[in-house]
Image (cartoon, rainbow, N blue to C red):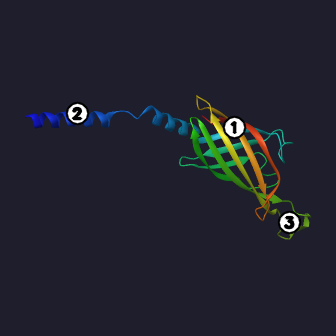
């Protein structure tokens, strides 16, 4: 009978361990990541660089489960550029880092180039690195952004800068 008592005790301990909830740190980590996943709208203000003169810059973001993201701005058509694509990761409690890139275009030298099949030619690419702090309620964030611009050869070009942002999560 002592073996039966030990087996019963071991079964109860294993059952209790299997039914316990996640540790608070793991649960908080998952909640914080879930707070970033989704669609966001942000207002940004650059304090230096090519975008500093723009006073109404807005970004729309989608942060996907698994660490990929897409960003588009209210200036994507001026000059025409595609959205930015990137990655994000959790770096601390309610703290995230995103790195995303987009292609830069240059205007045609003359309107006639468009008629000949030319147009907005590649002019390099831009890289944003953004440090995001999600609010405790998960409905907003603040951020700091650094921007670097590169020419078509991949060399650092003029135009980079620093910005701050404030975003809100899109909800029904």
Q: In the rendered image, which residue does mark 1 sit on?
A: 143
Residue 71 locus on image (x, y percent)? 68, 48
| Label 2 close to label 3 by CB (< 8 Å) | no
Residue 121 vs residue 33, the one in the foreground: 33
Residue 17 vs residue 172, the one in the foreground: 17
Left or right, 62 with reference to 154: left
In the picture shown, does residue 112 fall above or below 146? Answer: below
As measured in the structure, the alpha-carbon distance from the residue carrying label 3 to the one carrying label 1 is 39 Å
As measured in the structure, the alpha-carbon distance from the residue carrying label 2 to the one carrying label 1 is 48 Å
| Label 2 close to label 1 by CB (< 8 Å) | no
| Mark 1 nearby-residue class (10 Å; few <14, some 14–19, many ≥20) | some
Q: Residue at x 21, y 36 (%)?
A: 10
Left or right, 127 with reference to 3: right
| Label 3 close to label 1 by CB (< 8 Å) | no
Q: In the rendered image, which residue does mark 2 sit on?
A: 12
Q: Is residue 9 visible?
A: yes
Q: In the rendered image, which residue does mark 3 sit on?
A: 114
Check disc 3 and report its element: helix, strand or loop: helix
| Mark 2 nearby-residue class (10 Å; few <14, some 14–19, many ≥20) | few
Give the number of the disc on residue 119: none
Residue 172 locus on image (x, y percent)? 60, 34
In the orientation shown, which residue stands out farthest toward the bottom? 116
Residue 95: quadrant of the picture: top right
In the picture shown, does residue 141 fall above or below 65? Answer: above
Residue 42 locus on image (x, y percent)? 71, 38
Q: Nearer the viewer, mark 3 or mark 1?
A: 1
Check disc 1 and report its element: helix, strand or loop: strand
Residue 45: quadrant of the picture: top right
As measured in the structure, the alpha-carbon distance from the residue carrying label 2 to the one carrying label 3 is 76 Å
In the orientation shown, which residue stands out farthest toward the front? 2
Residue 134 locus on image (x, y percent)? 62, 34
């Amino acid at each position: 009978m002592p073996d039966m008592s030990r087996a019963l005790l071991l079964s109860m301990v294993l059952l209790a361990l299997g039914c316990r909830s996640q540790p608070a740190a793991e649960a908080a980590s998952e909640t914080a990541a879930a707070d970033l996943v989704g669609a966001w709208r942000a207002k940004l203000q650059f304090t230096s660089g090519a975008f500093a003169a723009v006073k109404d810059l807005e970004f729309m973001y989608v942060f996907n489960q698994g660490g990929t993201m897409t960003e588009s701005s209210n200036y994507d058509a001026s000059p025409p550029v595609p959205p930015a694509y990137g990655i994000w990761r959790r770096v601390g409690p309610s703290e995230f880092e995103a790195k995303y890139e987009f292609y830069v275009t240059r205007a045609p030298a003359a309107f006639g180039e468009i008629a000949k099949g030319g147009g907005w030619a590649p002019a390099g690419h831009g890289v944003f690195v953004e440090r995001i702090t999600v609010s405790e309620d998960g409905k907003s964030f603040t951020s700091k952004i650094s921007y670097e611009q590169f020419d078509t050869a991949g060399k650092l070009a003029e135009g980079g800068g620093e910005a701050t942002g404030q975003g809100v999560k899109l909800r029904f």
